Amino acid sequence: MSRRGLTTMELMVSIVILLVMSAVVAETLRNTIVVSNLLNDRDATVRSARVALAKIRRDLTLSYLTPNRTQPERYLTVFVGLDEEPDRLFFASLNHQRLYLNSREADQTEVTVWTERESDGPGYVLYHREAPRIDEEPAEDGVVFPLAHNVRSFRLRYLDQQSGEWRDEWDSRSPETPYRLPRAVEIGLVLIAPDPDDSSREATVDVPFLSTVMLEYATRMPGPGGLLSSGAAPGAGGRPGGGRRALPVGRP
């Protein structure tokens, strides 16, 4: 039985093979980590958009204009969408949830959605403001929190049930749309995300999201034969529109 050890040449070849295998494993791990980070960033972008759109959709679905326009000591509710770059929207909604016991709050709320420039990054920050009380300043006060970061574009369109056309802006205080809600709102949101094909993480891509929400308390669009083209026909649940809940009466 030979007890000869490795020669210098054999030892060098073994070390070279070990170094090559280590380099291959390290590069594979690096690429895996880079791809994983890119996918995580993309998933975070999608989650951020879904959360932002879900919040805006819930608020818009229950937006309303109070019928108590002539009663004294009442603040008029508004629905105003401004065609800016990006767009801005403020309105009254019934989507408020009380967080504290015995707080003097109801389901009514004032909501504002707007954008501001990122302080240390590209694009804009999409903000949401919610005030638990209706007052004479429909776009002021309340709790502000960010809905999404790295926003490239935020565009809104409003469906006019009288003309059947989409408008770029809406103002319930104007003579064109006097004290009425749009039938639907189209929300276009574009977020900035890292380019998955760029391992340096310097390049970016725009990820678009599009959603349309129907407003529950808006006037329905007329359909053939005088029926309603949206929602259930009159009589469903004993009320037009399939039994939607009534607007608050006696409150702002």
Image (cartoon, rainbow, N blue to C red):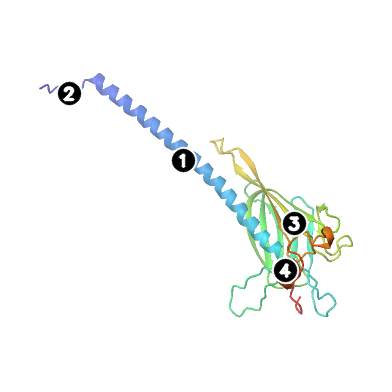
Name the kind of residue labelled 4 in the image.
Ala
Distance, label 1 to label 2, CA atoms, is 40 Å
Q: Sequence-wise, which precedes: disc 2 or disc 3? A: 2
Residue 179 visible? The answer is yes
Residue lying furthest left:
1
Foreground residue, 133 or 185?
185
Image quarter of residue 183: bottom right
The residue that mark 4 highlights is: 236
Name the kind of residue labelled 3 in the image.
Val
In the rendered image, residue 206, in percent from the top left (x then y), is placed at: 65, 42
Q: Residues within 10 Å of mark 3 (few under 14, many from 20)?
A: many
The residue that mark 1 highlights is: 33
Distance, label 2 to label 3, CA atoms, is 81 Å
Q: Nearer the viewer, mark 4 or mark 1?
A: 4
In the rendered image, residue 241, in percent from the top left (x then y), is placed at: 74, 66
Split into 4 quadrants, where in the image is the C terminus?
Answer: bottom right
Foreground residue, 222 or 111?
222
Q: Is residue 181 above or below residue 105?
A: above
Q: Nearer the viewer, mark 4 or mark 3?
A: 4
The residue that mark 2 highlights is: 5
Q: Is residue 235 above or below residue 4?
A: below
Distance, label 4 to label 3, CA atoms, is 25 Å
Say which element carries label 1: helix
Q: Sequence-wise, which precedes: disc 4 or disc 2? A: 2
Q: Sequence-wise, which precedes: disc 4 or disc 3? A: 3
The residue that mark 3 highlights is: 185
